[in-house]
Amino acid sequence: MPANRESRSVLIGAGAIVCACFLLAPIGIRGEYYLHVLANILFFAYMACAWNIVSGYTGQLSLGHSALGGIGGYVSTLLFIYLGLSPWLGMLVGGFTAMLVGVAIGFPCFRLRGPYFTLTTIAFAEILRIWVENTDEFMGLELRGAQGLLVPLKGNAPLLFQFDSKVSYYYVILVMLLMVAAVTWWMEQSRMGFYLKAIRADQDAAEALGINSTRYLLSAMALSSFLTAMGGSFYAQYFRYINPERNMGLDFSIEVALMGIVGGQGTVIGPILGAFLLTPAGEISRSLLGGKLMGLHLVIYGLVLVLAVMFLPKGLIEPIGRLFGSRRRRPTEAPAVRTAS
Amino acid sequence: MDPIILGIAVVNGILLGGLYGAVALGLSLIFGVMRVINFAHGTFLMIGLFIPFWTWQLFGLNPYVAVVIAAPALFLLGYAIQSVIIAPLFERERAMVLEPLSVLLLTAGIGLILDNLALMAFGPSVRGVQMPFASKTLWIGEMLNINYARLMAFLVSIAIAVGLTLFLSRSDLGRSIRSTAQNRDAAALCGINVRQVYNITFGLGCAILGVIGCFMVPFYYVSPTVGLSFGIRSFITVVLGGIGSIPGSILGGLILGVVESVAGQFVTATSASIFSFVIFILVLLFRPTGLMGMKV
Amino acid sequence: MMKRVFLIAIILGLLAVPFGMAQAGEKVDEIRIGVVVPLSGIGATVGAQMKTGATIAADEINNQGGIKALGGAKLKLVIGDTQAKPDVAASEAERLIQRDNVQVIIGSYQSAVTIVATEVAERYKTPWVVLASVADRITGRGFKYIFRPCNLAVYDAKEQLEAIKALSQETGKAPKTIGLFVEGTEWGKSHAQNVRTLLKNYGYDLVFDEAYTPGQADFSAQILKIRSKKPDLLIVAMFTPDHILFNKQYMENKLDLPFGLHSVGSGAEDPAFYAATPPKAVEYMFVQEDFQIDITDVQPWTQGVSKKAKEVLGYDLNAYVAQGYSNVYIIVDALERAASADKEKLREALAKTNITSGPALITGYNKIAFDATGQNVDSHGAISQNLNGKRTTVWPASNRPQGLKYVWPIPAWKDR
């Protein structure tokens, strides 16, 4: 929070206006397409925030999060197909499953640092994805491998997490996003957040001070996995189809990570800003240029990305944070104690 | 399992593995010296394949001869990208963390841009070079068949590895690179122009891909998305062999190639790739320096 | 303080961008057809071919005076790039339907992508004419707005096996064992499953059955395995890059398949494949595709279309160009009968389609008529054999050129 009272009230005021806009958006927006775009942005913002809980606050870049989202989607969908369990509940089961998987993966991964950690998360995610892609049947359940799963259509069934209109989905993801932002903020303020900051600045020094880094890193991973998986279930219910290639693939992990980093990792609203920059950038460039020269819109998107990384290395949050006179030192400003050797 | 078939699988695996190793060489070099994961590595390979293809298509130039064009061109491209785009960010980050995270993303963005520029310029079609020489094979016995072009690529891979090792150990520039890799601050204190070293290293890493590309084009294919499948495999090779170790890179490639080839005899290829990832993880966890790498 | 308020306003403005994207103006006297295909990433080649076919057809119609029943309304194609991702395709479909107000959409090649995007169309009651996606589920969901002129996946498999049976019966020489080698994602594996299911009716033994990861750099390991299992015939489903590598290595290794290599399209339908592979490597290969490859010989009017395709793409008419072209003509036929731009009336007209002649049959079908699920039951592919560098139709026998001598079984490598 910014230091002085004036900045704080401006911030709260701005925040309130923004929230009000989002809550009232469906009334003002003409056309389901724009609502769809917004819901899409909010979805990616949600995934970026969930990712940020571990990657932003521990400083270890995970590029395997899509697999956790995929697990969530698959578990809730399978429970729906075979047991008729409402995806509202299936989402939670998926979350717990992903949490277990996430911790199991995190345990070996957190022993590594930097790019090695990242590469290992990629390897684990790929193993999961390839396994699902090649498994048609598992313990009697039809996974359909590469063909993916279609969520049975039930028309407008709010109790079964299916709606005819986009508006309901929009509010669901909005609530989910607010929830994950709240969780992130709570975590940041809590003792866990405090310890994670120390671990992120210098893990060895933190451990020397008696901080059980494994415990806190794995807690962050568990939380992140649970929330990511819930996002995966949302995707399954929104698009009513999931497959290993898209939902557990490296592309998706990179897209989400990019938003987190470009927006500003290790902050509460950074990833949201990142999603608000990159998702429309992709959408707009594709809608304007997609049909013309093949690939041009992706060149533009890549340029936006490169420029954002080059000129906003700490993310979008930096200029915006300065706007509010924030004199709070961000985690990345802590000098590295390790020397280059 | 018939020992002859197993033997043939091993030979094929070695030929392929040498190629993986050579492709990974540049990555190993860049990773070892700059600690940067170059996500655009596959993209540079793609450019390294397109250059000899176009010189063949437009001028009828033999791809092997096109090395004199491809290698320098890629060196310059790598050098330029590193010095203009990556270096400023790198230096900014270097003060904060040891392994630059944003640089990884930057390379991903650059890769995306170059991939799609290629798509815009060349169109999406898959291309191939048609050279009678490329289809000639060497038969050993009745079942073992070695394609000359692949054999050439294998030999060139070894040659590059040897050449690079000699260059790094014997020449002044090589020593500068090695010392920068070990400790960039100490190297700077010794008067080494660290930024220049980085530029040259990156350029060199890309130039290697130019050479490999020329030798791959006769038996492989070319398209804007050709680099994708080599991406992750190169990382596995580098880690397996050891970061920053040139012979390690080749060794890692050979192991990967043989494992894939032999495993492919027992299980389907799709499951065999899980094997590669599992080995990758095990190596990282239990022997992070890889087989021949320097201390991380 | 003012500076902060100003900057807040800018940020809110940025956030408002998605809220405020301009609406495209509605034009009268124009029928907008959405073309939702992959134009970047994997499958971009096919997307470009489909788009070209559709553009050629739309231009032809417009030059001939547009839709007569609507007073000469012109066709306008609105293009969307799926990037081969289902959620992106869904966004594109949403945009085309909601913002660009298209009357009908065609697309999208990859089945996973089409499954999701067609659901969007169904929800918004917008007709969709499928391009090339063969997954059964696309027309198997009880949707009313989705029409598929091309083959169901299972037709492809059936035709391959029928052709083998027909050629065996005609020559009296039949294979006993079959091998399956497919790419390991959706299309390849579902084709393999279809073949396995149908195989029971034909009495062949399956001795080799494997999938590979697309993008594989070397097939020696599998060719070795295939050689040791000795199938009489190998059915493959491969994308272009893999097909190029596989055929080259199949030739170099002199892998003998007495009754031939049978490819079920994709790579083998791609002109780039033939440009990049030595002729000897594709000799005698059988290709099943949703298109009669030598149609320019059999129906000379198609040569004009082929020429236009060549101008844009650099190569002649192929299955995907033909499908793009055909789909537009199917829509035009429905528009003329509906005499309305209303989506409901268009859907009804499409459901009653009964085309037995004309440009829509450029794909080589005898008829286009949709059953209750939206599937064209008269769709069929054709099997061609590569003879002397020319791909010539050998099945169905009715599409075979008069007096053609196909090669069955094919000569061993040492005898060529």
Image: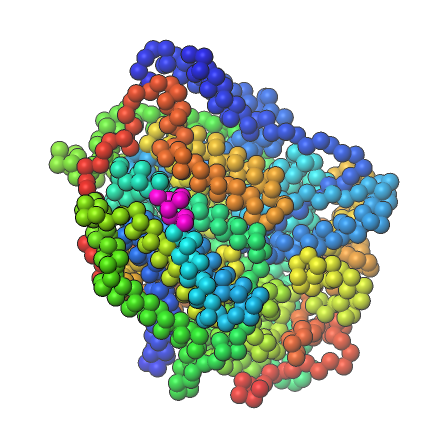
- In magenta, the rendered stretch is B80-87
Q: Residue at x 45, y 12 (%)?
A: C2
Q: Is residue B271 magenta?
A: no
- The residue shown at (66%, 47%) is C35
Closer to the camera in the image, B209 or A71: B209
Q: Quadrant of the N terminus of chain B?
A: bottom left
Vertical order, B28 against B264 (above or below): above
Is A253 positioned to the left or the right of A300 in the image? Answer: left
The picture quadrant where one finds residue C315 is: bottom right
- Looking at this view, name the residue that lies furthest to the bottom: C415
Residue C119 percent across, percent down from the top left: 61, 43
Along the viewing direction, whichever of B164 and B197 lies nearer the viewer: B197
| Residue B146 at least partly seen | yes
Locate residue A82, reporting x and y percent.
47, 46
Residue beneath the point at 54% across and 63% down = B54
Q: Residue at x 69, y 64 (%)?
A: C316
Task: Count how many numbered circles sit on residues in the image.
Answer: 0
Q: In the displayed structure, does residue B174 sit left or right of residue A129? A: left
Comparing C253 with C327, the one in front is: C253
Q: Position of residue A224 (x, y in %)?
A: 34, 36
Q: How is the image coloured?
A: rainbow
Picture coordinates of residue B150 (x, y %)? 42, 73
Instruction: Give the main secondary structure of the magenta stretch.
Output: helix
Q: Nearer the viewer, residue A159 or C191?
A: C191
Determine if residue C178 is in view: no
Where C346 sits versus C8, above or below? below
